[in-house]
Every structure is written in C-alpha cells, then in structure tokens.
Image (cartoon, rainbow, N blue to C red):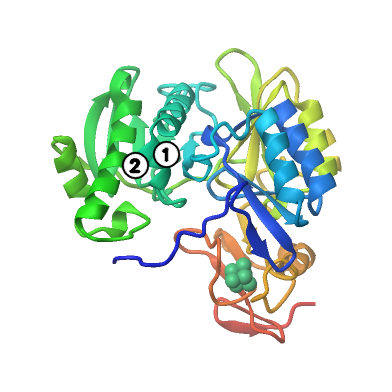
Amino acid sequence: MARTQTDRCPGVLAVHQAADGGLARVRVPGGVLTADQLEVLRIAAQQLGNGRLELTSRGNVQVRGLSADGPRELSERLYDAGLLPSITHERVRNILASPLSGLDLESRYDVLPVAAAVDRALCSRPGLAELPGRFLFALDDGRGDLRGVQADVLVRAVDEREAVLSLGGLGVRVGWGEAAEAMVAASESFLVERTAQGSQAWRVAELDDGASRILDRLGLDRTGADQGETSALVPGVHAQVDGKCALVVTVPLGSLGPEQADALQQVSAGQVRITPWRSVVLPGLSGDPSERLDEVGLVTKADSPWNGVTACAGQPGCAKALADVRADARRVTPKLPRHGRPMHWSGCDRRCGKPAGEFVDVLAIGNGYVIDGERMGLQ
Ligand code: SF4
C-alpha cells in the first residue's frame, strides 16, 4: 500500500508537540547506553521534561513534557554525551540488537559491533537521511529473539562465520564481513525501489513485492523464509560465559522514573542495554542487585504481573485519550486475568504501541474500559 502522509516520526530535533509538551525520541542503536549516558538522560528528563524516561518497542528512549526551549538544550546535552552523532540522520538510526548478545551460550555471534558498523555506515551516506523514521534494522545473535519484530532488514546469526539476511521473510546467506554493508545496501535499494514505484512507503512491506525486488536489485538469490515469533526476555539473573551475570529488569509500563534510572546506573557495571520489551539488561555484574532494584519498583522476578504489560501515552500526554490509562493500569493490572497473554492498555481505539500477536486488549471508552470486547468496571 502506498503511503502519502508526511513522515512525522519524532526525533530529538524534530520534536513532536504532544498535549503535555514536546516529545523527543532519542535513538539508541543496539539499545546500548553507558551508565554515564543514562545519567545524562535522567537529569535531562528531570530538568527539561516531566522527569520520566519512556522505553519504546524499538529500544529507544523518549523524553516528554519539554518546554518550548527544551529541545535545544536537550540536543546540546545529547550531542555532548555522544547520543546525537548525526544531525541529518538522527531519526533513521533505528537498529535493534539481541540484548544478551555476546554474553551467554545462546549467543552464536556478538552482533553489537555489527550494529555499530551499520550505524556508522548509515550516518556516513547523505542519501540515507531520506529513510523513513519507521524503517527498522534488527540484528539477532542467533537465539531467535528478534525474528518476530517485523524489521525491514533483519540479520540473524547462523554461526561465527555466517548470517541470514532477510527482508519480508525472504532470506539470503551472508558472511559477517559483508553483513553491515549488505544491510545498508538493502536500505539504499529500498529508497531506489520506492522511487521506481512512485511510492512514499515507510516500510519494505508497503511496497509492491518490495522484498523480492530489493533482493533482485542487490543481485542476491533468496534461499528461504526467515520469520518467527519474538520472545521477550525473562526477568532475572542470566549466567554469562565469563562467570559474571546479566540481570534482566522489567520497567513497569516502560516508564522509568528518576529514582529507578538512578538505581540502574548505580548498580550497573557501566552499561545498560535497552530491550524492545520495556525492560533493560545490566551486563557484567559480579553480584545480584535485585533487592535494590525491587525497592524502587523495578521488576526482577519472572512471575511478576508487570511482565508483558504495555500502555499507550493516554492522558495527559495525548489529546485523543479518553482516560489516564497509565494511572489506571498501575492501580488495576495485578488484579486482571491474563491467561499467559501480554496486556495492552489503550486510551482510544488506535491502540498505539500494541504488541504483535494475541494480547489482552484493555480499551478506554470514556466512561470505563472494555477488556477483550467486554465492558468492565475497574475498581
Ligand atoms: S492509542 Fe489513542 S490515546 Fe493512546 S496514544 Fe494512541 S492516539 Fe493517543
């Protein structure tokens, strides 16, 4: 389906004006932040925004509630912290990587250096500033956790020598030495094919026969499909191959308060990885800081009712919202039946940020909610 709308994906410089002020989205390629960068974001959110950091389904971070001169000050701070390396390409740096990459036995290849190489190559090519802000690259370290994220260009590790590059389910084998270049070349071919079709598509899937035509342009023979389900990381301690451990921590509703961000920074070993599942990974730990994180309302247990719960912005951030869904979700979620499904709270029937696949649908209707289509009073 051809798109004709203007690409309004927010960035740090192209801030979205929401009902509660400016909303800036900070791209974090590979989801990797240093502890110092997290501190910069925490302080910026406190001094320039509403104090909270929102984690997105693409492993990025949002600051909202910015005043009129907030974006300028924010962009200067992010530039100094190395979080805004390109003015022209900031919105196209959408690169997911397996959050436990390089840490445990399931990781067949550490894809984080490849993610960094893709980022550098993207930012170095002027024409790629034209990529839509929704175009998504993903690098799966072989465990299969990112196979279902609906990336436009996905690379999944086979072993230490080879990977499968796939577009829209069509896959080709590539060596690691050429993987970053192949991903970037695929995005360039997307733009060429988009122009050839007279389209303003944002995603490969929106082009007519897009995946096949892009592979043809690259001269690559497809070898088969490579799609599957995405599996969220389970909170708790994961053993690393080097004897240390990584802690997976769920951030309830993906909204990180200042005290929580400070606690993560304090207990980290210098790095915090943002996942696509509203959680973070603290790699390289020598001990288990779960108790400290539990104290500030973060979730380190696999059986917590907060795992797999998401919500749109709702009131007061979105003018369309019929309820303050986040406040209601905080109050009611632990009491609601889930039957093993994720749960998503929406302030209107656009259901922004809903998860892929089956989920418990909690929808505001103005005078209450319907849950999976049934009217429910929330006490
Ligand atoms: S689902 Fe509706 S209320 Fe929620 S953020 Fe989207 S438009 Fe706003």
The answer to whether any part of residue 72 appears in the image is: yes
Is residue 224 shown left or right of residue 334? left
- Pick the front one: 45 or 5: 5
Q: Quadrant of residue 81?
A: top right
Decide: marks 1, 2 in contact (CB < 8 A)?
yes
Q: Residue drawn at (52%, 56%), measured in percent from left and top?
A: 9
**Which residue position is annotated with label 2?**
153
Ligand 1 located in image quadrant: bottom right
Q: Residue drawn at (55%, 70%), measured in percent from left and top?
A: 351
Is residue 187 shown left or right of residue 252? left
Mark closest to the chain's N terminus, 1 or 2: 1
Residue 127 versus residue 365 in the image, above or below: above
The answer to whether any part of residue 144 appears in the image is: no
Q: Is mark 2 within 8 Å of ligand 1?
A: no
> Type of residue at label 2?
Val
Q: Position of residue 129 (x, y in %)?
A: 42, 42
Query: What kind of element bears circle 2?
Result: strand
Query: What kind of element bears circle 1?
Result: strand
Residue 175 versus residue 301 in the image, above or below: above
Q: Residue drawn at (19%, 41%), measured in percent from left and top?
A: 215
Q: Quadrant of residue 279?
A: top right
Is residue 330 shown left or right of residue 246? right
- Pick the front one: 8 or 349: 8
Q: Position of residue 78 (x, y in %)?
A: 68, 35
Q: Residue drawn at (77%, 62%), measured in percent from left and top?
A: 330
Q: Is mark 1 within 8 Å of ligand 1?
A: no
**Which residue position is annotated with label 1?**
138
Other-residue count near label 1 (Cα within 10 Å), few / some / many at <14 / 14–19 / ≥20:
many
- Pick the front one: 58 or 133: 133
